[in-house]
Amino acid sequence: MRVLVLTSSTGGGHDMRARSLAQWAARERPSWQVRLHPVLESTHGLYRFGVGIYNFIQRTEPALHHIYFNFLESAGMFRDEGRILGREKFRQLLEEERPDVLVSVHGSTNHGFFALARAVLGDQVRCVTYCAEMHDGYGFSRHWVNPEADLFIGSMPETLEAAARLGVPAARRKVGGFLLNPNFYDTDTDAAAEAFWRETLRLDPRRFSLILSTGANGAHNHEVFLKGLRDAGLALQVVVLCGKSAETRRKIEAAAPGLAEAGIELRALPTTDQMPLLMRFASAIVARPGSGTCNEAIQSGCPLVFNRVGSLMPQEMITERFCRKHGAAESVRGGAELARLVKRWLDHPAELHALRARMEAVRPRQHPTDILHLLETL
């Protein structure tokens, strides 16, 4: 079976899910031919510019994204195949690849690009959306949902409620659970995780440890949170993810000696593929409320603290809304709030255990192989 996955690098979650689908197919369906295609960046320069603007806003001023989001919601520039710029490039790709299944993991690629695929390939192709958004309401883009698609797979039951509201028939709505790297589903990695913490990080996996996360495009507030923890006089371990930025890592490592004097043992890491091992023994992870990190945290049972510094983007609001509904995460607006939360957990560890239990209760019982099966049945 030939599968073409449509993605785009707005944030990091879409590409992560595209890679995960390819990894699961390679592991469980080696006869499949899976190609990942960054459709917006590859189709036209204006779309590539828009991707850059999205990521710039995410890094610098998340609240401004409400303007960007509402413009795209009303403009509908990807809903009609005739309005897609650079569509001949996409037609050429379809003619070369001739996929049996088109899987969209991005909110902008479920209408016009599906219509183009059907115009080129006719009944040969099946068009599928995998949507990882976790809740309906403001922040859930209407562009995710195409009632004419052959299948809509949502990560959670709340995702299907949004699809139903926007007209997808019940027979074409399926809960698929999380689409994550296969390592997040391995059950025999405790020894490997302990070795990673002790030998690679040179940290004690039994001590209270925080991960300060960085988005795929460099969004973080590390200095704000480290200052709050230092000023509160908390003794703990902190692993700081620096992404692709050597400058961020240099600054964090330069601050490490001073933080060590205050009782904070610090490790700075670049982009890593060891997140399952890292999250296995972390006491909590602090991250923007993207659905990707949220999915990873729930699957790993790693308590989640949402970084609300600078307000939230619309898509982040629905992730937080889901977690607030289920009691599956905490939120902080700055370093002092994070320090108070950590101190509360240190003083009352039962609260942290209860949070883990609520995360376990909301964890999907579906498996990524169920998503492969749904594609197969088409």
Image (spheres, rainbow, N blue to C red):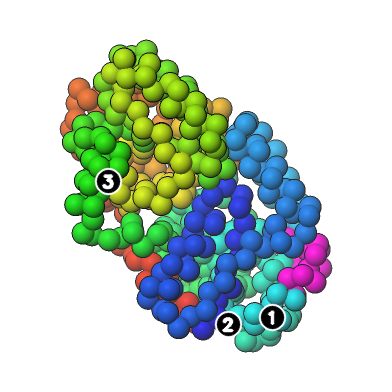
Q: Residue at x 75, y 76 (%)?
A: 92
Residue 271 point in image, percent of width and height: 46, 45
- Using the numbered discs, state the Cα–Cα distance from disc 2 to disc 1 in whole angstroms: 12 Å
Give the secondary structure at mark 1.
Answer: helix
Q: Which residue is mark 1?
A: 96
| Magenta span includes 90 | yes
Residue 313: name its quadrant. top right
Decide: few, some or many residues near mark 2? Use Cα within 10 Å; few <14, some 14-19, many ≥20: some
Q: Nearer the viewer, residue 369 or 30?
A: 30
Q: State which tag comes first along the sequence, 1 or 3.
A: 1
- Using the numbered discs, state the Cα–Cα distance from disc 1 to disc 3 in whole angstroms: 43 Å
Q: Do we see residue 265 in this rendering?
A: yes
Q: Which residue is mark 3?
A: 196
The image's mark for residue 100 is: 2
Q: Residue at x 43, y 73 (%)?
A: 25
Q: Nearer the viewer, residue 3 or 251?
A: 251
The amino acid type of the residue labelled 1 equals Glu
Where are the magenta residues, as a range?
78-91
Q: Looking at the image, do the residues carrying marks 1 and 3 touch, with CB atoms under 8 Å apart? A: no
Q: Residue at x 34, y 66 (%)?
A: 367
Q: Residue at x 34, y 42 (%)?
A: 328
